[in-house]
Image (cartoon, rainbow, N blue to C red):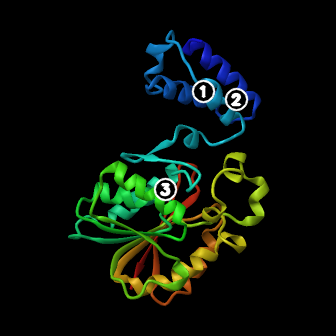
Amino acid sequence: MTAREALAEAERRLAAAGVETPRVDAEWLVAHLLGTTRSGLAARLDDDVEGLEPLLERREMREPLAYILGEWGFRRLTLRTDRRALIPRPETEVVVERALEHIRGIEQPKVLDVGTGTGAIALAIADEVRDAQVTAIDVSPDALALARENLELTGINGRVRLVEHDLTVGLGNADFDLVVSNPPYVDPEELEALQPEVRDWEPHGALFGGVDGIEFYQRLFSDCPEYLKTGGHLVIEIGYGQLGAIESMVAGSPSLKLVEVTNDLQGIPRTLTMTKS
């Protein structure tokens, strides 16, 4: 079939499957098969398309588009994506933006990315601050393997160190200028309310943050002062409705002070910045 016909068929079937953005997803799939971009489709509508059916069936099963395509954009990078780690999201790009504000101007800043997943945050920081020395940790060997593939794919070599490490065992007295994290923060009680793309496909270990979704933050705030320099910053992503509970936790810390709350594009508090006194 032609690209025009493929788009119409894909849009119809994806809408019937309950996909929220059937036309956009259809464009992504057809563009992928043609080896072009969504914006380039307009000039290729009469081209023949092959191989749509298996991709379309996967999307009808509500497998995330990023997993089907095998890659996803994050800031200036294109990263490999699959079920080993969460899909990088626009909200997390804001986390990177806030993090960068606090290390630009520091010579060879030392950065720790806690729960790196695909490596998105660590690699974006290393890409945009060319002398940054980044340590990226994750408890999942599968996620770290994916992050290592992305490290090789992006060509950011020598300045990002990937380490399998569980935050619960601490990090000693490392001296970081910046700690950044997009941790598991979904309340397990919200499981059934999640979209199928998230609930059925993305790794639960990277999604759920224990009771009320905030257990990870408790560990992070407890351990962070041990490995953050005085005057250094901690930048984190938080979930919907969690600001009050997390503000209370920070208020109880003897050395962390909340200095900024940044909303996402929907006006929801999403990124918190703290400093160590």
Residue at 63% over, 65% down:
205
Res. 30 in view: yes
Give the residue at mark 3: 92
In contact (CB < 8 Å): disc 3 and disc 2: no
Q: Earlier in the sequence, mark 1 or mark 3?
A: 1
Q: Is residue 216 left or right of residue 122?
A: right
Give the residue at mark 1: 26
Amino acid at dot 1? Ala
Binning the other alpha carbons within 10 Å of mark 1 as few (below 14), some (14 to 19) or many (20 upward) gives: many
Query: Under tag 3, what secondary structure?
Result: helix
Q: CA distance from mark 1 to mark 3?
A: 25 Å
Residue at 63% over, 62% down:
207
Q: Nearer the viewer, residue 150 or 188?
A: 150
Give the residue at mark 2: 14
Amino acid at dot 3? Thr
The quadrant of the image that shows the C terminus is: bottom left
Query: Under tag 2, what secondary structure?
Result: helix
Q: Position of residue 135 (x, y in %)?
A: 37, 70
Q: CA distance from mark 3 to mark 2?
A: 27 Å
Q: Quadrant of residue 184?
A: bottom right
Closer to viewer: mark 3 or mark 2: 2
Q: Position of residue 206 (x, y in %)?
A: 60, 63
Closer to viewer: mark 1 or mark 3: 1
Query: Residue at the top extreme?
Result: 46
In contact (CB < 8 Å): disc 1 and disc 2: yes
Q: Nearer the viewer, residue 236 or 38?
A: 38
Binning the other alpha carbons within 10 Å of mark 2 as few (below 14), some (14 to 19) or many (20 upward) gives: many
Q: Is residue 78 left or right of residue 66?
A: left
Query: Residue at the bottom extreme?
Result: 254
Q: Earlier in the sequence, mark 3 or mark 2?
A: 2
Residue at 66% over, 61% down:
204
Q: CA distance from mark 1 to mark 2?
A: 8 Å
